Image: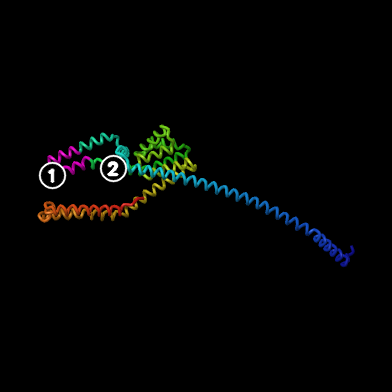
Amino acid sequence: MRNMDPTILGIVLLVAVSTAAVAYGLLYNRMETDKKTANRINRVKSAETDMGQVKAARDRVQEISKRRKSVQDSLKELEKKQQEKSKKAKETSLKSRIVQAGLSITPVQFYVFSGFLGLFVLLATLLAGMPPLVMLGLTFVAALGLPRWVINFLVRRRQKQFLEEFPNSLDVMVRSIRSGLPLNDAIRMIASDGQEPVKTEFRRVVESQQLGLSVPDSIARMHLTMPLSEVSFFAIVVAIQGQAGGNLSEALSNLSRVLRDRKKMKAKVQALSMEAKASAAIIGALPFIVAFLVYMTSPQYIMILFTDARGHLILGASAVWMSIGLIVMRNMINFDI
């Protein structure tokens, strides 16, 4: 086969390149137009997608804002109700204090017992031959002061026992709700199998539901017989969940953790303030100890305070100033958490 002439081969290549250049020149504008059109369509579609995403995001933000506003309004309303209940709790009657103490007596029985106690102390001081002022003072303390102090002591002890057991009861409710039980059944479980005094308080909640009250209202009534901030937290969590929805088991679990952290913080504050409390106790007992030692060593030196009118004035002024100092020290070492 004879070799192709290089000149002919060059002419063929040149014709091919020229044809390709002419074709590209003729089709360039159309290609650019199609490319710009495609880019414009893609930008429009992207803009529509972005607008849809922006609109969806705006709708989500508005929904979250509405829900947050609803929760805030609910919190304000519940806070107002809790403040009114706290104000009423501070002005509780004797009957309410007896219920908070867990006693099963009536106010009439309490007054009768106080009267008998005052009469007994009056007879005892009369037989002991004490001065009339001392007799009246001791009778007044026995009839009015001591029984009410006992009631307040029982109330504080019962509230302390409630706070010890309440987080455990919340954990039981959390496990019950996560296992599929409704809130009513979880409350009934605590009312039947819980520990005192939580058992009694939840039994009152169940009784309130049987009378026709809703679950949030029944739990809110618990604050009347157990006026604690922890009970208010529990009532607010249940009320918010009932109005705004949400994961109740997670909310109760968080509340249980918060209550345990509050308990740890109280214990830590109490441990840190023990030194100040010991110092206050020593300072408060020091005048009595010194007076007793002086009486044991030189009775005639100190008895003038009890026999002379000027000594009575000094003792009275000392008692007033000492009481003020003890109150100031008590307020300095007691913290609300």
Q: Quadrant of residue 283?
A: bottom left
Mark sitting on residue 308: none
Is residue 126 inside the magenta stretch?
yes
**Residue 314 vs residue 104, the one in the foreground:** 314
SS state under label 2: helix
Residue occupying the point 12% across, 55% down: 302
**Residue 154 vs residue 57, the one in the foreground:** 57
* Image spot of residue 281 (x, y percent): 24, 53
* Image spot of residue 315 (x, y percent): 17, 53
The magenta-colored residue range is: 118-143
Q: Which residue is mark 2?
A: 152
Nearer the camera: disc 1 or disc 2: 1
- Please identify the quadrant where the N terminus is shown: bottom right
Q: Residue furthest top?
A: 211
At label 1, the amino acid type is Pro
Q: Is residue 61 left or right of 161 when viewed as pictured?
A: right
Q: Is residue 19 above or below residue 131?
A: below
Q: Which residue is mark 1?
A: 131
Residue 124 visible to the viewer: yes
Q: CA distance from mark 1 to mark 2?
A: 30 Å
> Badge 1 local density, few (<14 within 10 Å), some, or many (20+)?
few
